[in-house]
């Protein structure tokens, strides 16, 4: 249960949303994060802080947020503010910066910061040359996308790659945003198994792994594909020959037994006719109808 931090009944009525919405936030430990936006009472943005999942407490269906501590961490200890928490999931790009050499290759490790002619520059010791002190310059590179065009009503923007970012994930993430979303549950420790609900055959349910991101809101209206749900044996009726033809007329003077004993006449009876005889005919008719069904099935298997 979420902590209330001394909210009054009026504040609860103002801030608590009674409608419960499904969200998979918090399951993607790598890409889920929170953007905290702090405004003054005049709605002017004061500052923004990115919060990781480790900076909040996710307790079941609740996200426990210590607003006061977050404000103090931003240096805001006095005053009245309006805060907005945005629960987000990274789809493409990264907020962190990386270092690359003059060819665009990403460089990792420790770097030395120097101020040369009033400009901040970064250097890294050349591998194997730490004793001589020889260094090469590296450059900061942000894995962000460039705004190419903005619509006239400011509701849409077109973005493009930064050609100087060689990272393949950087390019693939953006391209995949416009592709079909495929979700496969994590199958481990008996999780990820899907089954039909015992009480409602139109409902599918599965046990989700604690680290599985689960379904998302943009998957609503999509397709659920279950591989190998039906097994094709080769004996399926694809011609509907077992359905009764409404135009068929049978001679009422001839009995089913006579038709069966004449061998060929029994073919005028559909599979449904034979089933009806088994259900409603005499004991002798039921016997021959059952024999006819078994022979018909054997011929089809052959």
Image (cartoon, rainbow, N blue to C red):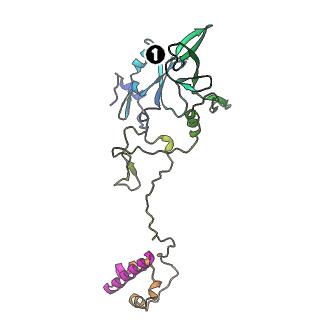
Quadrant where the image shows the C terminus: bottom left
Picture residue at 39% right of the left edge, 56% below the top? 201
Q: Is residue 8 visible?
A: yes
- Residue range highlighted in magenta: 277-302
Q: Secondary structure at mark 1?
A: loop
Q: Residue furthest left?
A: 283
Percent of width and height locating residue 128: 51, 19
In the rendered structure, the answer to whether residue 62 lies left or right of residue 160 reads: left
Mark 1 closeness class: few <14, some 14–19, many ≥20 residues within 10 Å: few
Percent of width and height locating residue 51: 45, 24
Quadrant where the image shows the N terminus: top left
Picture residue at 45% right of the left edge, 45% below the top? 184
Classified by dominant secondary structure, the portion drawn in magenta counts as helix
In the rendered structure, the answer to whether residue 91 lies left or right of residue 212 reads: right
Does the segment drawn in magenta span residue 215?
A: no
Picture residue at 46% right of the left edge, 16% below the top? 74
Q: Quadrant of residue 291?
A: bottom left
Does the segment drawn in magenta span residue 282?
A: yes
Question: Relative to 280, is 11 above or below?
Answer: above
Q: Quadrant of residue 8?
A: top left
Percent of width and height locating residue 33: 46, 29
Residue designated by label 1: 74
Q: Quadrant of residue 274?
A: bottom left
Question: Relative to 85, is 44 above or below?
Answer: above
Picture residue at 47% right of the left edge, 44% below the top? 183
């Amino acid at each position: 249960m979420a902590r209330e931090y001394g909210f009054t009944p009026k504040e609860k009525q103002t801030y608590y949303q009674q409608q419960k919405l499904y969200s998979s936030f918090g399951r993607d430990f790598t890409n889920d994060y929170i953007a905290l936006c702090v405004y003054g009472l005049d709605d002017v943005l004061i500052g923004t802080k990115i919060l990781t999942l480790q900076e909040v407490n996710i307790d079941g269906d609740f996200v426990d947020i210590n607003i006061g501590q977050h404000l103090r961490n931003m240096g805001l200890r006095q005053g009245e503010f309006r805060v907005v928490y945005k629960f987000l999931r990274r789809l493409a790009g990264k907020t962190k910066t990386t270092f690359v050499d003059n060819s665009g290759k990403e460089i990792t490790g420790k770097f030395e910061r120097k101020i040369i002619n009033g400009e901040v520059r970064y250097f890294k010791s050349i591998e194997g040359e730490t004793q001589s002190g020889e260094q090469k310059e590296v450059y900061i590179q942000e894995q962000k996308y460039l705004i190419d065009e903005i619509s006239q009503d400011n509701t849409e923007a077109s973005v493009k790659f930064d050609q100087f970012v060689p990272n393949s994930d950087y390019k693939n993430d953006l391209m995949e945003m416009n592709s079909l979303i495929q979700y496969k549950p994590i199958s481990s420790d008996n999780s990820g198994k899907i089954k039909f609900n015992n009480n409602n055959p139109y409902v599918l349910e599965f046990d989700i792994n604690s680290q599985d991101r689960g379904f998302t809101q943009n998957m609503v209206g999509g397709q659920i594909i279950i591989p190998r749900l039906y097994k094709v044996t080769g004996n399926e009726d694809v011609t509907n020959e077992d359905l009764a033809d409404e135009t068929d007329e049978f001679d009422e003077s001839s009995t089913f037994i006579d038709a069966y004993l004449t061998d060929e006449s029994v073919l005028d009876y559909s599979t449904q006719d034979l089933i009806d005889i088994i259900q409603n005919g005499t004991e002798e008719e039921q016997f021959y109808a059952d024999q006819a069904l078994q022979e018909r099935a054997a011929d089809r298997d052959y």
